[in-house]
Image (spheres, rainbow, N blue to C red):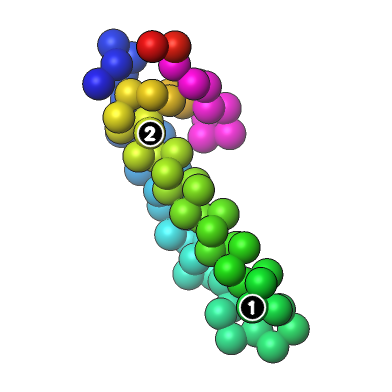
Amino acid sequence: MSKRTVHGPQLLTFISKIEKNLEDFNFYDANSSKEDKMAYIRYQRELFDIAERVLAGSLYFVGTSQEIRETKS
């Protein structure tokens, strides 16, 4: 873990946003291609990977979940 503080509320909000995105996504939408659906799911996975990296200390949130910075080892 890095010396930076992981702010629980920011991390929970970030993960909640991912969960909400997946809840709102219509997997059965006939107007979306399989490729579009898979791309959306992959993007949500990338967001979850960011949360994992924050917990590992290699990234940190700056202010909001929109501002994410890499830490220098």
The residue lying at 38 percent from left, 24 percent from top is: 58
* Quarter of the figure with residue 19: bottom left
Task: Find the residue positioned furthest to the right.
Answer: 31
* Quarter of the figure with residue 36: bottom right
Q: Tell me, for residue 53, which label it has, or none.
A: 2
The residue lying at 62 percent from left, 63 percent from top is: 39
Q: Which numbered disc flags the more N-terminal residue, 1 or 2?
A: 1
Q: Tell me, yes or no, whether the two marked residues, 1 and 2, touch with CB atoms within 8 Å.
A: no
64 inside magenta stretch:
yes
The vertical placement of 56 against 32, above or below, is above
Residue beneath label 1, please?
A: 34
For the stretch drawn in magenta, the main secondary structure is strand
Amino acid type, residue under disc 2 in the picture:
Arg
- Residue nearest the viewer, comparing 72 with 3: 72
- Residue nearest the viewer, comparing 64 with 34: 34
Which residue range is magenta in the image?
63-71
Q: Is residue 63 visible?
A: no
